[in-house]
Every structure is written in structure tokens, then in C-alpha cells.
Amino acid sequence: MKYPARPATTPPQLPEWDPAWSRIVEAPTSDGTHAFHVLDTLPALRAAGVEPAGTILALHGNPTWSYLWRRLARATVDAARSGGRAWRLIAPDQLEMGFSERLAHPEMPTPKSAQLRRISDRITDFDAVVTTLLAEVADSAAPNGGSSDHPIVTIGHDWGGVLSLGWAARNTDLVSAAISLNTAVHQPEDSPLPAPLRATLAGPMLPTATVLTDWFLRVTLSLGDLDAETRAAFAAPYANAEDRWAIGNFVADIPVDGNHPSDPELQRIGRDIAAFDKPALLVWGPKDPVFLERYLRDLRQRLPQADVHRFETASHLVSEDHDVAGLVLDWLGAQFDTDSAAKNSVSASGPGSTAEADSAPGTDPAPIRAVTAILDSRRDDEAIASVDFAQNPAQQITWRHLWHVTTSIAGGLLDLGVKPGDRVSMLVAPGNNLTAALYACLKIGAVAVVADAGLGPKGMTRAVTSADPQWIIGELPGLALARAFGWPGRRISVTPLGPVRSRLFKTETSLTALSKTPHRAELLTPADTDAAAILFTSGSTGPAKGVRYTHADISALAAVLTRAFDVREGTGLVAGFPPFALLGPAIGATSVTPDMSVTKPKTLTASAIADAIIAGRATMVFASPAAYTNVAATASALDDEQKAACARVELVLSAGAPVPLELMDAIAEVFPNASIHSPYGMTEGLLLTDIDRSGVAEADATGGLGVCVGSPIDGVELALAPIDATGDSAEELLEGDAARNRLGEFVVSAAHIKSGYDNLWRTTADSARDDLHGLTWHRTNDIGHIDEAGRVWLEGRLQHVVTTPRGPVGPGGLEALIDTDAEVSRSAVVGIGPDGTQALVAVLDAEGTALAPGMAPLELTARLREQVLDVSGQDLTAVLVAPEFPTDIRHNSKIDRSRLAAWADSVLAGGPVRGRV
């Protein structure tokens, strides 16, 4: 069968495509002059009266075409029309792809065919097209070489990613920065090709799957959230076998091993990319079955300066699933627009990453104390440092023992090959083993990755994979998960496993063995700005995010705990809340881990917490509201010794969710002499505001809307971003009287908040985009209001704002009101319908009540409607009772309102009441 030549053409009318972008460009390539269809926004910019101030050179992969960049084209033109930097986008269809020229071929493509267009040819083609187009305007608006006034940036996807990166690396005199979406540079010899490629390359499958049929095309287009019209647009240039010859060509030219004709060129490209030192951005869809995590890992090693943004729910066609165009423009603005670039520099370093870590705003910076300083100073102290009730029997260790064990493990890790900056996933339950592993890593500058088991296997897999640790330290359950789900990292067990299980779980040694390592004369001291930990959020509002903390951030957090709650060296601390179980050695407290399941806070009993208090001579207790609820419920089982121990407790802290006054009163019965506090915070900032029992009672008496969490603690600055009618928070920040009694998003600044999100460049930049008073801020995503007394009232999360015809509503405020009704145990307020005209619906939890799932009783509904109308002026459209409430595992309190809203919408439309919520 022969494949005839055909000239280049322009596309027909397609969705989201502007015909003004299309042009045919003749360019001299390695085998003569050829015609390319090119997406070029220069005419559109000039029609708008704008000259380009930067150029983006985009290259698609296989089997897409320049249609892939249509949204980037639209975004760049719209931004230019709005007064932003005018980026010209040049995106050629590769030769014989899209609507570019087709060459004549006498036979099917095969890997060693002389007629294949090789990787080297494609880079030459790209160079020819962009050189031709850049030369058109070299003497007017755009220089032929990139500069700060007119930067030239490459972007590519799939094979267009590696080709564009290779071209950029060979043209650093022109190129100012490079961006790549899912792509690959190197195929490890010890790893098989991804399954879809293996299937396509298998013998006669190559021509059948790629040319004779549209199988390869259809499979690729299934790897993204595409509607039928969009799939048809991508497939438009590949209607028959003659059009698809280059798809087979591309697949046949994949270097599967060192014997492939294109392997030398790909190796050269890889070396060139590793020498590229300009700014870079890697955008990744982790659900891609072809470009797997190992390819991202390789790219990050070659481009260590690269920013990374992962869209956790995206697959191969990441730009079809998410707003990649917006991300690209934001990143380019941070690199090349002076104000944004300066601000990005601040947000990248993050609050608390300099010597101001222990200082309140307006004070002289205090020196930063190393996280391990107190542990090191107590190296000869025989006092109890930690008690672990997870061990049977409970295990006590002294400060001297803890120092020696952590120092030995640190040296053993270095001997094993752990380097400063290496990431170590901690698959160990809170207790002495986790403390030893964590502080050993802190001593040598390794970065601890902590994703608690409450995320479940799927959530933990996503978290660990995104953090991409080089090492795993795990107990058997964690090692079993790592083996089952293929988590990255060399393995270290906690205790020796024996030869059979060591081979099964691929462990190289154990903490027990490492703890016997002779001490080194000296350990390298990590810098304050070095990363110390990646702590994952609960995942209650989407995929769990890794929150990056530096050594200075953790030191600042320890200082805040000491300053705000008078926690001194020698204090006994019972930590039933995992994040604070790890701070004991940093603050010099005797830490006691009670007998409970970390994934089930309700398993903490009054007897267990009392035994922990006795063992650690504790005067301070820290747990979650769910844990305290069960402690109060089981208090009748306490004996006289346990009751006396509880009576010695001076401070009770609860975190993870606000604590209602009823629970505080119940806690006070267990700890009659304690000051009971409920500090508000999040993984990104663990201590931000504080309120005590009397403060809760005083706030409740005001009848305020929402849950009062008190006032900012010493060292925390608070501002408010008002929420508009669309449910978005404003760019302007309000403080003082201007922020009083307005619904808005809380924005905080403090030395101990996060330095950033891991592998989420845009999320980091967006959360830290404010620069009020020259401080670095964090947008919390929590909403509410600040009352006349300066107290913070929580009313929910930004994404849960209900936009009714009467204005935006924070659901948490109405929920707090509804929850006061005697028939209600827990509620969630959701919006049903289009934004701006949403109906307000209250969903009640049937658990623990006499309510039956379905529509709430008429009398209850009428009563709640009247309450809501009186307090907020809003109409409650319906009141439903759900059979269960979907909540997170870590706190057992954060409600998944999105799922409840979908359930409520279905029920109101006549769907089943008892379906899965």
C-alpha cells in the first residue's frame, strides 16, 4: 500500500478554535522545504492593537496537533487585550501531523525503516519553523533572541515535551525558560516500557494500532476529560490511514533500547537538558498510564531548578483536564513581570524561613533554635523523655537514650547512603519509634514525609507517590502497603524481619540495626532554610496536599507552643493528636503517646489517657475533639488514682476542629483543675488563634453566627479577604475596623506557617499571593467574620460558600445555629442549583437521633426555617435527613459537603434516599 503526498491545509471550523490563528509556513528542513500548519496568534494580537512582548513556542506530541494549545492561545490573547503582557504563541503541527504537509511513503512505518522521520529530524523541523517566524518580526517588535523585555519560552507535551526541551537546551542564547507537560527523556534499562506502548510495539500491532485503524488515537483521546466534539476535533486530521502514517512513524521511532537508531540522539538530548539552567516548569498528570512517575523523577534530576505542579486527578491530556493555560500565564508572570517575580521570590522562601522565626511582628528577630538543640543539650540526662503506650508493655526512654539512639540512627542512615535533602517516608505510628526515626532524619538534613493512615490506601498512595521519597522507614502494615501499591523508596523496617520477610518487603536494614551504629565525630548541621518535613493534609476537601516545613518553621512552631501556652522543659505532655506528638523533643517536654489508634481518635478512653498522664507525670494533654468525646463518655471507668492524675492536669488543648461548650464542660469534669483551650489551626499553620472555656461561653452568649475560635495568638497577623456575590474572595485585604462583621476568607501571616506546598507551584503561589505590609501571608481557605472584639468566627470553607440570590452564605454559621436544636446532632448546609441563584438546603445527620432518612419532619423544618430567616435573612428551601455523613478519618469531623450536596440534589430530584452519600 502506498501513502501519497498531500499539501498542508488549514483546519475546518472547530470548537474553541479561531481560524485567524491558522497559517501555512514554508520552512527549510533537513530534507528540503516543507509546508507546516502553524497556530500563530500574532495576527490576533495585532488586530487588537497589541505588539508581542514575549513569545511562547509550543510543540504537541503524538497523536495530537496544535489544537492542544487552543486554550493557551485564547488565554494569551485575552490577557493581552486586558493589559497584561502580550505573549505571542507559535505552535506548529509537526510534519505529517495535524494539518501540516504529508509526504509520500511506499510502505508501513517500522522502527528501522529508512523513511522514518527521526527525533533529530523533528528538532530540526521545529527549529526551521520557529526561526522562520521569529525572523519575520526580528527587526520590529520582537528581538531574534530572548531577553527580559521579550522572553522566548518553550512548552511541549508528550514527545513534544522532550523535543522542545532539547531544542531549548541547544538554544540557550534565545530561550529564557522552558515548560513541559507529561513527557519522558530516559527509559531505565531495569524498567519495562509502559503497558500501552508495549502492546502497540508488539510485532504486527504497530501498523494495525497506529495506521490501519485509529486504535492508538482513540486510546490517547480517552486519557482526558474530553466531550464528543473535542474528541472529534483532535481526530479531524487523522480520518484515514493515509493521514495516520506519522502516528505510526512516531511510535516506531521510540527508542526502546540502546540498539534503536534514535537512541543516541535521545541520550544526547537528555545530556543537553541536564545542562539547561534557565527557569523551568514541569506540569504533571499523575494518572497517565504512559508517562509514569519515574519519568517525572528523571526530569527533576535533570532540571533540579524546575518548579513542579501536579494536577492529582489528571491523566495524560493534563491540559484538557485542568486550567494549564492559567497556570502557565501565572508562572510566566512570576518569572518575567517585575512585581510578580519579586513577590514570587518571597512566596518561594515562605514565612519563617529567615531569622524572624521566633519573633512576633514588630519585634527584633530572635535567634532560631535548632529543632534538635534541646535533645542535644540533654544528651546525658537520665530523666524520662518519652513514654509509648503503643508498645506492650509501655516503653519508657530517657533523654540520654533518645539522644544516643537518634545519633546512631543518623550515622547509620548516612552510611546507608541517605543524603541531606533525601526524602524519607515515615510509615510508623506515633510513638518512640517514629520519634527516633524523625529526629535522626532532622539531624542529618533528610526530609521526613508524613502521610497518616487516615488517608486510606488510595489516599496514602497518592500522597507518597507525589512526595517521591528516596527512602521508606516502616512498620509491617506500612511496608505491606508500600509493596502492594509499588510506592517509591528503598525500604528500612523498624525491627529486624528475618531473611524471608526482608526479601518479601525488600528491606535493606532496620532501625534496630541502625541504632547500633557507632557515633560519627560530627554530623552536618542543616541550615534553617532547609526542608525538614512534608506533612500531608487530611484530604477532606480534595486530594491531600503535602505541606512543606523548613527547620526554621518547626523551630518557630515549637517557640509558639512554648510562648503561648507556657510549655517549658520538663513539662509532661500527653499527645493524642499526631502532629504534636512529634514536638516533645523540640520543646524539651516529656512526651507520652497514649494507647489509641491514630486513625480512630474515638478509641482514646479516659483510662488510657489517665494511665498516660501517670506515666509521664503530665500536666498537659493534647487531643482532638473526637478523642475527647470518648474520653468524657468513658470517664465513669476511672479509678481513684486515675481521677487524681487527671486532677493534676493544668492545661488541656484540643485541635482538629472547634470544640463546642458542651464538650468543654464535659472535658472539665474529667480535668477539673485544667485550663481548657481550643486553638484553631491547620496543617499549614498549626496554632493561629486560641480560645478558652470561658471565652467560648462568652462568645456563645453573643449569639454570633458561626463557631468562635478566639483571637490571634502572639505572633500571628490576621486579615480578611471579603467574599463577593460570586463566592470568590477579593484580592484586597482588610484589617482592623474595616474587616469587622464581613464575610470573608481569613488570611494569616506568622513565622511558623508553611513554607509552601510540595509539587504544587500554583497552589503555593496562590495561597501566598498577598504582600500587605511586606509580610508573607497564607490564604487559609477558611471563611467567616471577625467581630467587634476581634474574635474569629468560622463559617466554613471557601469552596463551600453558597451563592443565593440574597448574597453569599457561609454554611458553617447556619450549621452552628441549626445544631443548637434539640432534635439535631449534626448538620451541613449546601447549595443546590446554578451559582448566584442557589437554593439553601440543610442536611441533618440521622446518626444518634430519632430522625429517619428523607425529608425532615414538617415541624422541625418550619422551626429551622424560622431560625435561619431571623438570624441571617436567608430562606431555607428544604431540610433533609441523610443516613450518614461522609467525614475525614483523621479528625472524624470534617464533612464532605460536596458529596452531601450531590446526594441532596439527587433526593430533591426524586432519587433514592438511602443511596451512598
Image (cartoon, grey):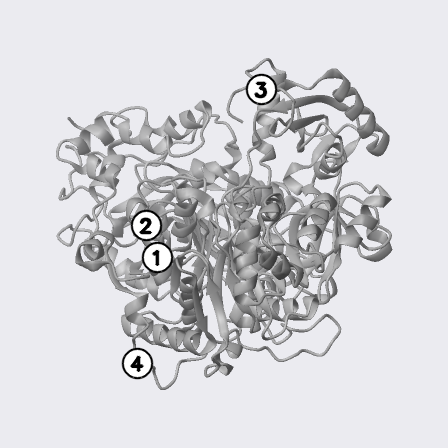
Q: Classify mark 4: residues with Cα within 10 Å, few (<14), some (14-19) or many (20+).
A: few
| Mark sitting earlier along the chain (1/4) | 1
Residue 504, disc: none
Q: In which quarter of the image is residue 724?
A: top right
Q: Name the residue under label 3.
A: 906
Q: Mark 1 points at which residue?
A: 474
Q: Of discs 3 and 4, which sits in the foreground?
A: 4
| Mark sitting earlier along the chain (4/2) | 2
Q: Are circles 3 and 4 on residues that touch, CB within 8 Å?
A: no
Q: Are circles 1 and 2 on residues that touch, CB within 8 Å?
A: yes
Q: Which amino acid does label 3 sit on?
A: Ser
Q: Of discs 3 and 2, which sits in the foreground?
A: 2
Q: Name the residue under label 2.
A: 482
Q: Which amino acid does label 4 sit on?
A: Pro
Q: Classify mark 3: residues with Cα within 10 Å, few (<14), some (14-19) or many (20+).
A: some
Q: Which amino acid does label 2 sit on?
A: Ala
How far apart marks 3 and 4 lie (CA) works out to 64 Å
How far apart marks 3 and 2 lie (CA) works out to 38 Å
How far apart marks 1 and 4 lie (CA) works out to 23 Å
Instruction: Name the quarter where the N terminus is drawn.
Output: top left
How far apart marks 4 and 2 lie (CA) works out to 30 Å
